């Protein structure tokens, strides 16, 4: 930029810009496999972190329960997961299908490469400081988002 604007020195602008850059790259890569970022979060949560309930997934992804319900419905329709216990609305569990497991393995590589790309731009000490700073900035911010 030839001219420095005050806006560009604000933490919100910088963090949002970085998030959007990372989001756009990841969405492009995942879309080639028919997966969105939120779908990836569910696949990871269920397949790699053993988060198997809709409410647990909402907490895990930090989005609202209605948003998770819509997402799970879409993913079930696409054959990525199956829900059990639907007759008893009080308790539903989610499990990946074979297709969901395949997408998890494939997309995990893409997500790891993206993370390594951006983390690799920083000295390890700066990376740790950056991650700590993000944790401090988000601490006690109990906001449920409609999308991540």
Image (spheres, rainbow, N blue to C red):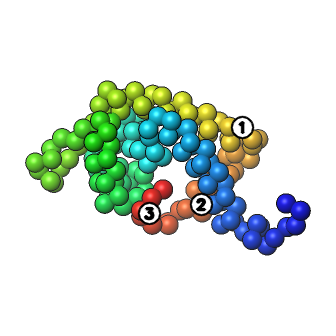
Q: Residue furthest bottom?
A: 6
**Which residue is disc 3 drawn over?**
145
**Which residue is disc 2 drawn over?**
136
37 lies left or right of 97 = right
CA separation in Å, label 1 and label 2: 22 Å
Q: Residue furthest left?
A: 87
Query: Can residue 1 be seen in the rendering of this structure?
Result: yes
Question: Secondary structure beneath disc 3?
Answer: loop
What mark, if any, has residue 120 been given in the picture? Answer: 1
- Decide which of tag 1 and tag 2 comes sooner along the chain: 1
Q: Residue at x 85, y 67 (%)?
A: 4
User: Which percent across, then down, holds residue 77?
Assistant: 27, 42
Q: Residue at x 51, y 39 (%)?
A: 30
Residue 25 falls in image quadrant: top right
Question: Secondary structure beneath disc 1?
Answer: loop
Query: Can residue 41 be seen in the rendering of this structure?
Result: no
């Amino acid at each position: 930029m030839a001219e420095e604007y005050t806006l560009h020195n604000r933490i919100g602008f910088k963090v949002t810009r970085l998030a959007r850059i990372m989001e756009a790259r990841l969405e492009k890569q995942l879309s080639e496999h028919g997966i969105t970022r939120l779908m990836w979060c569910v696949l990871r949560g269920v397949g790699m972190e053993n988060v198997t309930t809709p409410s647990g997934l909402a907490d895990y992804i930090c989005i609202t329960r209605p948003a998770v319900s819509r997402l799970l419905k879409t993913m079930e329709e696409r054959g990525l997961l199956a829900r059990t216990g639907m007759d008893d609305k009080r308790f539903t569990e989610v499990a990946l299908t074979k297709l969901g497991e395949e997408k998890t393995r494939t997309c995990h590589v893409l997500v790891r490469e993206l993370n390594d790309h951006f983390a690799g731009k920083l000295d390890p000490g700066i990376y740790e400081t950056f991650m700590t700073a993000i944790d401090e900035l988000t601490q006690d911010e109990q906001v449920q988002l409609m999308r991540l």
